[in-house]
Amino acid sequence: MTNKYSSIKKNDFKSFATTLRTNMCGELNRDLIGSKVKLCGWVNKRRDHGKLIFLDLRDFTGLVQVVFDAHDNEPAYNIAKEIRTEYVVLIEGTLKARSAETVNKELATGDVEVAADSISILSSSKTPPYALDERDRVDEMTRLKYRYVDLRTEDMQESLRLRHKVTSTTRQYLNSNGFIEVETPILAKSTPEGARDFLVPSRLNPGTFYALPQSPQLYKQILMFSGFDRIYQIARCFRDEDLRADRQPEFTQIDLEMSFVGVDDVLKLIEGLIAKIFAETLGSDLALPFKRLSWKHSMEAYGTDKPDLRFGMEITDLTDIFKNSQFNIFINVLSRKGVIKGLKVDDGSQFTRKELDEFVDTARKYGAGGLIWIKVESGNVLNSPVSKFLTDDEKQQLIDRLELKENNLVLIVADQFLKTCSALGALRNYLGHRLNLIDLDAFDFAWIVDFPMFEFDDREKRLSPMHHPFTSPSPDSLDMLDIEPLNVKSLAYDIVLNGNEIGGGSIRINDIELQRKIFRILGFDDKRIEDNFGFFLRALQYGAPPHGGIALGMDRLVMILGMLESIREVIAFPKTQSAYCIMTESPSVVTEQQLSEVSIKLSPAKKQGEE
């Protein structure tokens, strides 16, 4: 959980003198020895050594030791005796050098201390629910409930400093590249964008609703139609969907759009932005340009369109080896135009039968029918529950294709392309961590390009956009729109980092007839097109430039920069995985009067077991 990020030092925040203070705690150093100082902050720790009391005073920039000596100043000493942890105090005193034997080399201000002349209690505090330096031993639900305490910890303060630095660097970079920042509405129109909308009832227009924006996509494009050329915003977005460690119902994107550009223009700009962010925050120089992988290659080699490239272990296609197989599972898969793929693990001897069975369960979890494992024993003998179904020729081809040696393990999945790739991709990621193959200090970027325009939605039994319906088809596959839409490629691109998608975008459609055609391929009739997108199409018909853009996930990017495990660690007031704020206890019920004002009447809640 500890934030490893350390480039933004607390003393980057210099003195902000006010009527109450002359200095910040973290900026005090030997150059100021002998100065009279007034400090404000929280009591981090208190130590009573008889006639000497030591307080560690903390503010946003760090902490400094303050000494109260009963022999020198009894009134101040007596007040200090009553002070407890997290009291807010004002202290006046003189900055002195610590003696050589008491210097604290672990502290930025460890070679100085304040000899107190006076202390005033600005606010008392209850005993906190946990000590700030014991955060790692406190469960997350407790930390979220007392978030106002949790935010005082060094980890959270550093995380939000990092977020600030990313935000400010982004603005500086984009401003210097001809962008202007434009805000778009939070109360917007509900349009189908892949996730459920959060709806807001309108009091002034009874029976109607706004939607909180899943993204500012349509507004960004309309700004291009309006001639602004380059715009961006640090955009708040909202999606009512199931949560994970890196997902929240409300989140932040770096959203931008550019006119008269192609794919290379957008990718080059974003590489410059990412390089600038890493230089400013981590002091790292990234190698540019980032590698590019086609979607198909990424799926075939890594089983995912957001591959972790910090280790190898690529997936190998084995379909041709088993094209004449007499094994029923392979026969059935190949008859349905499926594929057979495998993953080689160098040291497979360490895995127990129980773990191998768990690999089978993982494959099924990702939609595949199952998994076949093969262990390579002495003399290149292939030991597997299915060995008897494989011919000697198939076994030899497998040995040659995968360059198998003793103690190797082969994991084989046979199913439809996406299910096979996804199952092996999940196992590859698991094994990368399990076998310590990943350099956890590395940052490995790639662009994923040449995405399919559409995918088939098994649940809805219809085509859906791989990204969104405003993505432009690739010009060289336009002729397949009417006859083979699943083979149409798009001008979409995702940027991935260490197995995480941190952004995605595309060149957009700027032709109204092509846009209508895409809507119809997706199954929208004229009425739905008008109801959902009429305003957008009306704007599009007044002349739209070729344009494209991207959205980067701010929360996820900061999480990775800080080497943290959850985006909740980089958001000041996050929600739980059930989209609940423990601190404010929201969402919460509202009064009948509030509901009546927006013309809403709630149905009685169904009891458990009722239909």
Image (cartoon, grey):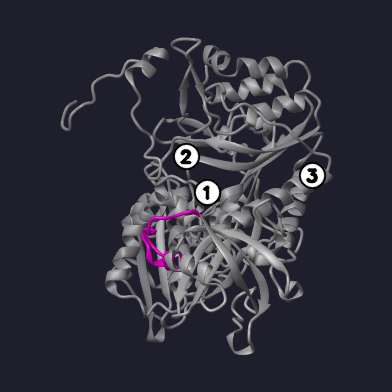
Residue 249: numbered disc: 2
Q: Amino acid at mark 1?
A: Ala
Q: Residue at x 37, y 80 (%)?
A: 349
Asked which quadrant contains residue 479, the reply is: top right
Earlier residue among tags 3 and 2: 2
User: Decide: marks 2, 1 in contact (CB < 8 A)?
Assistant: no
**Label ID, residue 265:** 3
How many neighbours does mark 2 have within 10 angstroms: few (below 14), some (14-19), or many (20 or more)?
A: many
* Residue at left offset 70%, top offset 59%: 22
Query: Distance between the Cα atoms at labels 2 and 1?
Result: 14 Å
User: What type is the residue that disc 2 sits on?
Assistant: Pro
Question: What is the spatial separation of the Cα atoms under label 3 and label 1, in whole angstroms?
Answer: 34 Å
Q: Picture quarter containing residue 293?
A: bottom right
Quote the CA–CA distance across marks 3 and 2: 31 Å
Q: Residues within 10 Å of mark 3 (few under 14, many from 20)?
A: few
Pick whichever, 147 or 522, lies toward us.
147
Give the position of the C terminus as an image quadrant.
Answer: top left
Q: Are marks 3 and 1 in contact (CB under 8 Å)?
A: no
- Residue 496 visible to the viewer: no
Q: Position of residue 429 (x, y in %)?
A: 47, 63
